[in-house]
Each structure stands twice: as C-alpha cells, then as structure tokens.
Amino acid sequence: MKFSLVFENSGDSLPFESVNCEVLSFYIEQLNQRGLNKFSAKNQNLGKTILSKIEQFKTCIIEVNKWLYDLTDMKIGVYDVEKYLDQDILNQIHADWVNSQSLIYDIQKKRKQFNFLGIAEQIHDKFPDAIQTPPLSTVIDRIGKAEIYRSLNEPHIHKLESSFDSIRYQVSDAWTMIANNPFPKNILTNNIANLSISFNHLGRTLYNKYTNFDMNLKYDDENSYDQLLGFITLSLALPQTIPLSAEYINWCKLHNKVPSGTQLNIGNIPNLYENLTKYRKIIFHNLLSNNTFSIQQIKG
C-alpha cells in the first residue's frame, strides 16, 4: 500500500510505503470520519529552530576559517543555507574536522611561510624548542581556539543532522482518542521507521515496564497502544529492523505476555538515500510556513 503526506498550501508531498497496512488503513479511515486528518507540528517554532541551527553553524565556519587556513592551508566550505541540509556536505565537513586533529603543524616551516610574522610567531612563542612539530589539535588549544573548533562537530553538525530524526505532529484536537486499538500487540516492534503513531498515552508499554524494572508486573499501568491517538512521528532516519532481545522475550513468556516493542510503525519512505536532501528541504520549508499535512492513500 502506497500513501503520501500532502502538505496544505505548498502542495508538497512525501511518498511512503506502508508498514502494517491494516493499521494504516484503519487509522486513515478513523481520522477522516472524525474530520481530524490534518496534522501540524507539535513545536510550531521548529522550522525557525532548524534555520537558527544552520545560521549558527555557518557563522561558526566563517569564524574558524579566519585562522584555520593559516594553520592548515585549507578552509571549510561556506554555502547558502539550504546546502547545509545536504548530508554529503555535512559528512565531508565532519571528515575534514576529524582528520585535521592528527595533522602535524611544522612550526619552523610555517614561520618561514609567514615571514616570521603573525600567528605563526604567536604559535612559535607558545612551544619550547624541543617541540617543533606538534599535532594541530594541540596548536589550536594553545591559541585558545579549541572550544570553537570542537563546536563545529558538537553541537553544530550533530544537532543539525538529528533535526529530522524525530518530528512530532498532532491533529488539532490532539487529545481526542481516534479509536480503540483493535490490533494485536505483536504489531509493536523496536524497529525504526519513517512514520509511526507516537506513544503519547497514559501508562507504560510492556517493553517500557521491562526496561524500568517492573520485573514482576507489580504495578497496573501498562498501556501498549491500547488507543490510537492523534499524534504521529515523522523521521528521516534510516529505517532499521531491531529485534526484541532474547532476555525480554523470555521475560514475556514467564508472565504469559505477548512480546511487543515500543513502536507502532506505519510507513517508510522509498529511495530515502537518493532523496534525503530533497525531503529535508520539503519538511524544512513547510515547517517554516507552519503548513499542516494530511495522510492520503494512493489509489491503484
């Protein structure tokens, strides 16, 4: 079964292939019957937050480039805002940052290159004569630039990369129960998918009770998606199959429980790798505009 998230106003769409077809069909039907098939970002400022992350990252790069070239004869790429949504560019910057840590700075060579002036002389003055080829990471620390250089990686690259890993959306009347969940608990897994019905329930899933040491099921607060609610999670992380552990399955058998996970997944994006930048841009633009979307089954 194929379906799309179709954004209001822009007309943009994200294609999906269903996971748990019966659940998805039932969920769309119940949403439509209640006039609730319109999802908005739970965090209405998320688009601006992502934009701010990009701008701060770009500013950091510009500041680092002011002195990095003099140390390494290389600069980090400076791009238009949307280019920083390209994971290949982020991967390149990350690799350059990692590999630069082990570069060797030749103090005497650099002094000659800069005619015994400027930053090369400042670095020379910070090292004893016995140390003339320190690692670049040590040099950066000695000139007081370690903190800003580290920040290229964390927080900037990693926070930007994770911005699209778990975006929560909700219907306008979010706390309305869409329906009681008529499906068996074994549909719940620990797999990572691109679209899932979010856990926003009162209580704990069975798996969550296990991981929080309610080993004898002493407390009566299990809720393993007993209801289908108006919350979903959109993710551009790579889908993964993550089996339930043998220990957890044995514990379920001991208590005569159906092994189940924490995720109620409903869809994955085909060809995500080839289209990651495109889909990041679509989500980013629609978050900035606070556009809602509906879940629409593709007929035929």
Image (tube, helix red, strand yellow):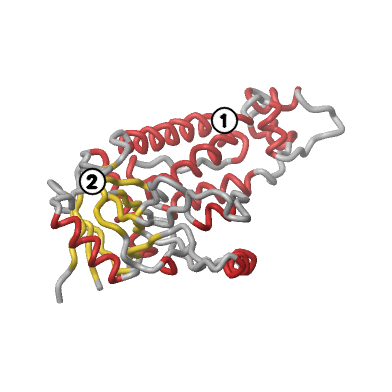
Image coords of residue 177 (percent x, y): 26, 50
| Quarter holding residue 298 | bottom left
**Residue 270 sits above or below residue 34 on the image:** below
Q: Is disc 1 surrounded by few (<14), some (14 to 19) or many (20+) residues within 10 Å?
A: some
Q: Is residue 230 left or right of residue 225?
A: left
Which circle marks residue 148 in the picture?
1
Task: Name the residue carrying label 2.
Answer: 171
Image coords of residue 217 (percent x, y): 57, 54
Q: What residue sits 47% from the left and 65% below the top?
A: 240
Image coords of residue 53 (percent x, y): 41, 35
Mark with earlier residue (2, 1): 1
Looking at the picture, which amino acid does disc 1 mark?
Ile
Q: What residue sits 59% from the left and 36% below the top?
A: 150
**Residue 193 sits above or below residue 200 on the image:** below
Q: Are marks 2 and 1 in contact (CB under 8 Å)?
A: no
| Quarter holding residue 69 | top right
Looking at the image, which is closer to me, 236 or 141?
A: 236
Looking at the picture, which amino acid does disc 2 mark?
Val
What secondary structure is found at the residue carrying circle 1?
helix
Q: Is residue 136 left or right of residue 188?
A: right
Of badges 2 and 1, the one in the foreground is 2
What secondary structure is found at the residue carrying circle 2?
strand
Q: What residue sits 29% from the left and 58% below the top?
A: 180
Q: Residue furthest right?
A: 130
Image coords of residue 163 (percent x, y): 41, 44
